[in-house]
């Protein structure tokens, strides 16, 4: 049972200010890291009382619990030894759920980061509803969930109920997606992965679901692609889909042109970053758990981020090793990697991860205890209870772990190696190979001390490609494993480390640095002293600009004698970067095909999978996405996702409405012929001391054209302040030239027309307005139009003020929940921004900036 149920009255409660001050000192003034730790990981009760003053307290909590488990076994690690491994986020970094849940008596939740659930081959409504309830039950305990839909019969198949034929996959995608969005996890949303086999006859509908339906906003989607399909694509031949999938006696078959369906995948991935691709034969052929498929370990799907392929009711806990900490004399010509210390810590990491499984089993006991004590009747509780019993069985029997790495980009820079170079790729592979060998050695040693996982059978694994690579690399380890078995059925992964990398103050996972240096603004209050004003925004607020360095870029500067206190110009910053090991090594610099090759090389030493996204510019052609996906398959990657900058805008909508998508489809890729009469909104605003007005013509509520300028311009716009809408009418003057008139009804209901709207404002404003109106008429998503307007490099202050006014006027039409790309929160520097009621809102710290 969980031994951590300390009464709240015995714990010291800290104020928010005490915790913030201590955390800022811990993170050396890094307010973002401090805020993330306090909001996500500091020990709290349901009333918000905080019981940990700094991450040292959290690490003490975790170390005490792991040491308690260690004491049950031979050769135990002491609490101090564990603490020294995890303190300061320096070496071993447990990921989200373990960091939050270990030793936490206030939360009845799992320590597992991710789960997969499944239904065998049941496609009944009862089976489908059971999965729906199971995913909700897991998400409320902090788990991300994946499941596969290949068992659902295709659209149009006969069914023995009143419907007569099946509706296919898509309605159930929407059901599961909606359930996910309903589940709150301490302020978070549930995370879901839905997958389907390309062999399923409804695969095409699945691939289009997030494009055409606009409803599956609560799930990531990935397609399981087999080698036969890929070969059919390359040879431009026919591929046969079946239901049940890959059946020798299918109930339904469908012949398709593989290249056409592949083209749809490429187009949709190019346009919306989904679906992701899972190269299923590679996953299954390389999978050690699938050597035990007949015993319940057949891989069905992956977790939401794609790095852990799992069988039904299995789960995984994650831990990352901070690679930067093993570089001796970093950022110097003497820099080297401490392989001896690294090997020692990998063995310790495997030990700690096995201990966390025991802690998870205690947590599951607590969950089952709570379920049994709940007042609902047994019939209601049965699904949840059986779910956790199944998960408990798999965790205890297979003892799966998920050890990965973080700070790859910083490690390479500290060694003087350029990310993506041949030398860099080879060194990254060497690191991962060492990690794999030492983790498996650690698991074999644990099998000697604690016993192998219950169903270990060396005969089943003898032809597994991963095991054969281990045998070739270290035959002694292989024969030791044959003799003693190993403690864990599978061990390794590379997961995203988003918030934890903020606390390690390093690059994330195997990703390169995003930007080594950039400028940030701080608002200047009227009473502030000893400040300078570098920028005044459209609402008149003053801002001071200052340079922000990536933590390890700053470390490079200090080691190499550069002044970190200077307020560098952009030219000086560029020159600094050119001198550094981060030059040509940012996420925008990396050759994408090199990144795929690097992933393939590393993947050979990861028994699960790797979560990695290939970021490409907005103007990347579809053919490049095709090449990247094809190269990923050829390189032996297990999965791949390509994100084209800005590609989700106007497609992924986080609220339940799909207005933005419908309008974009109706406007299409070509100009819609302008009706003679358009409904219009009138928007007023103030930039600095100037009063502005905008007339925005609408088609079905979406901006189609814009006229804007100063209210008190020379010709002037005489319109009452109460007028908020009207009509924009296209007419011709006596000379046959087109003009645009604005018409509104006065308080008595009489129509009033302002003629020549397009000539009432500064001609320069009108010329730019025509350009912007053209982009609106072509169906460009509103948030991208706002970004375009903001990026215009205009000559004088007046026209730049006009530019800001246009952006403000258009922001109110951006659908709530639309992701904002290429911008950072001015409060916490997060990129997790969305538009809400026309304002940029940060999902991480909650701050909002309008205008």
Image (spheres, rainbow, N blue to C red):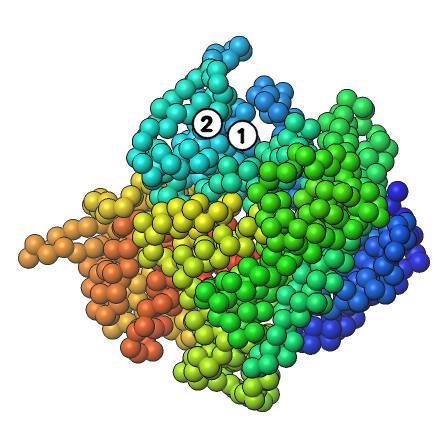
Q: Is residue 398 above or below residue 79?
A: above
Dot 1 falls on a residue whose secondary structure is loop
List x then y, in percent, for residue 603.
54, 51
For residue 189, the mark is none
As measured in the structure, the alpha-carbon distance from the residue carrying label 2 to the one carrying label 1 is: 9 Å
- Residue at x 67% of width, y 70% of height: 338
Image mark for residue 200: 2
Residue drawn at x 73%, y 76% is 25
Is residue 295 at all visible to an observer of this figure? yes
Residue 33 appears left or right of 732 = right
> x, y (%) of residue 655?
51, 44
Foreground: 216 or 472?
A: 472
At x 40%, y 54%, the residue is 644
Quarter holding residue 339:
bottom right
Q: Residues within 10 Å of mark 2 (few under 14, many from 20)?
A: many
- Count of marks placed on residues: 2
Foreground label between 2 and 1 = 2
Q: Assess whether mark 1 and mark 2 are in contact (beta carbons under 8 angstroms).
A: yes
The spot of residue 493 in percent (x, y) is 62, 50
Residue 460: image x %, image y %?
A: 66, 34
Which corner quadrant of the image does residue 133 belong to?
A: top right
Pick whichever, 103 or 401, lies toward us.
401
Residue 783 quadrant: bottom left
Q: Is residue 683 visible?
A: no
Q: In terms of secondary structure, where does tag 2 sit?
A: loop
Quadrant that contains the N terminus: top right
Residue that numbered label 1 is attached to: 149
């Amino acid at each position: 049972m969980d031994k951590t149920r300390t009464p709240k009255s015995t714990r010291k409660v800290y104020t928010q200010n005490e915790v913030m001050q201590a955390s800022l000192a811990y993170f050396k003034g890094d307010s973002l890291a401090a805020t993330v730790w306090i909001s996500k990981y500091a020990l709290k009760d349901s009333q918000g009382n905080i019981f940990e003053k700094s991450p040292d307290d959290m690490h003490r909590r975790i170390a005490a619990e792991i040491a308690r488990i260690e004491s049950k076994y031979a050769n135990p690690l002491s609490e101090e030894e564990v603490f020294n491994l995890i303190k300061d986020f320096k070496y071993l970094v447990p990921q989200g759920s373990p960091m939050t849940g270990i030793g936490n008596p206030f939360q009845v939740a799992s320590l597992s980061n991710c789960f997969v659930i499944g239904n065998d081959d049941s496609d009944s409504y009862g089976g489908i509803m059971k999965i729906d309830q199971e995913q909700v039950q897991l998400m409320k305990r902090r788990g991300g969930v994946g499941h596969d839909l290949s068992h659902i019969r295709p659209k149009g198949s006969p069914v023995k109920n009143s419907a007569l034929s099946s509706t296919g996959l898509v309605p159930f995608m929407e059901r599961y997606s909606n359930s996910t969005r309903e589940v709150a996890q301490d302020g978070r949303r549930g995370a879901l992965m839905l997958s389907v086999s390309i062999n399923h006859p409804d695969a095409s509908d699945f691939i289009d679901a997030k494009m055409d339906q606009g409803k599956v906003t609560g799930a990531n989607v990935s397609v399981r692609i087999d080698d036969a399909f890929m070969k059919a694509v390359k040879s431009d031949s026919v591929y046969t889909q079946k239901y049940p999938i890959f059946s020798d006696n299918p109930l339904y078959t469908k012949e398709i042109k593989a290249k056409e369906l592949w083209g749809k995948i490429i187009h949709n991935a190019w346009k919306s970053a989904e679906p992701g691709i899972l190269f299923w034969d590679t996953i299954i052929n390389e999978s050690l758990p699938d050597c035990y498929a007949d015993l319940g370990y057949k891989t069905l799907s992956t977790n939401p981020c794609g790095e852990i392929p799992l069988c039904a009711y299995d789960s995984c806990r994650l831990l990352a090793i901070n690679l930067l900490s093993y570089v001796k004399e970093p950022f110097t010509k003497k820099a080297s990697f401490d392989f001896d210390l690294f090997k020692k810590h990998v063995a310790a990491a495997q030990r700690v991860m096995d201990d966390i499984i025991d802690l998870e089993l205690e947590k599951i006991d607590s969950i089952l205890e709570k379920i049994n004590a709940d007042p609902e009747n047994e019939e209601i509780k049965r699904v949840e209870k059986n779910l956790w019993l199944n998960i408990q069985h798999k965790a205890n029997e297979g003892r799966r772990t998920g050890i990965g790495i973080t700070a790859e980009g910083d490690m390479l820079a500290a060694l003087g190696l350029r990310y993506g170079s041949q030398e860099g790729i080879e060194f990254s592979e060497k690191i991962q190979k060492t990690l794999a060998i030492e983790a498996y050695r650690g698991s074999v040693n644990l099998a000697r001390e604690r016993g192998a996982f219950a169903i270990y059978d060396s005969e089943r694994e003898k032809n597994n490609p991963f095991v054969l690579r281990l045998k070739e690399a270290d035959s002694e380890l292989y024969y030791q494993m044959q003799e003693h078995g190993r403690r864990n059925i599978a061990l390794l992964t590379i997961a995203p480390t988003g918030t934890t990398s903020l606390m390690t103050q390093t690059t994330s996972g195997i990703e390169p640095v995003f930007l080594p240096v950039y400028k940030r603004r701080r608002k200047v209050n009227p009473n502030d002293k000893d400040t300078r004003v570098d920028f005044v925004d459209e609402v008149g607020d003053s801002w001071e600009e200052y340079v922000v360095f990536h933590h390890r870029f700053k470390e490079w500067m200090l080691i190499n004698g550069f002044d970190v206190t200077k307020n560098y110009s952009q030219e000086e910053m560029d020159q600094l970067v050119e001198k550094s090991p981060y030059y040509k090594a940012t996420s925008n610099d990396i050759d994408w095909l090199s990144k795929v090759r690097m992933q393939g090389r590393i993947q050979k030493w990861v028994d699960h999978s790797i979560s990695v996204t290939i970021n490409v510019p907005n103007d990347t052609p579809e053919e490049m996405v095709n090449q990247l996906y094809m190269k990923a398959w050829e390189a032996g990657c297990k999965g791949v996702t390509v994100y084209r900058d800005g590609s989700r805008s106007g497609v992924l909508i986080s609220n339940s409405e799909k207005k933005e998508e419908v309008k974009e489809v109706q406007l299409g890729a070509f100009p819609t012929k302008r009706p003679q009469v358009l409904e219009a909104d009138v928007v007023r605003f103030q930039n600095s001391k100037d009063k502005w007005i905008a007339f925005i013509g609408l088609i079905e509520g979406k901006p189609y054209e814009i006229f804007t300028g100063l209210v008190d311009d020379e010709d002037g716009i005489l319109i009452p302040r109460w007028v908020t809408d009207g009509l924009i009418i296209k007419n011709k003057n006596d000379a046959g030239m087109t003009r645009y008139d604005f018409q509104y009804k006065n308080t008595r209901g009489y129509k009033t027309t302002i003629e020549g709207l397009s000539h009432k404002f500064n001609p320069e404003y009108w010329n730019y307005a025509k350009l912007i109106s053209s982009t609106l008429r072509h169906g460009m998503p509103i948030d991208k139009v706002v970004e375009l307007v903001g990026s215009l490099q205009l000559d004088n202050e007046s026209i730049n003020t006009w530019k800001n006014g246009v952006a403000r006027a258009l922001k109110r039409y951006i659908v709530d929940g639309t992701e904002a790309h290429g911008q950072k929160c001015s409060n916490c520097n997060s990129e997790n921004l969305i538009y809400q009621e026309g304002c940029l809102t940060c999902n991480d710290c909650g701050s909002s900036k309008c205008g």
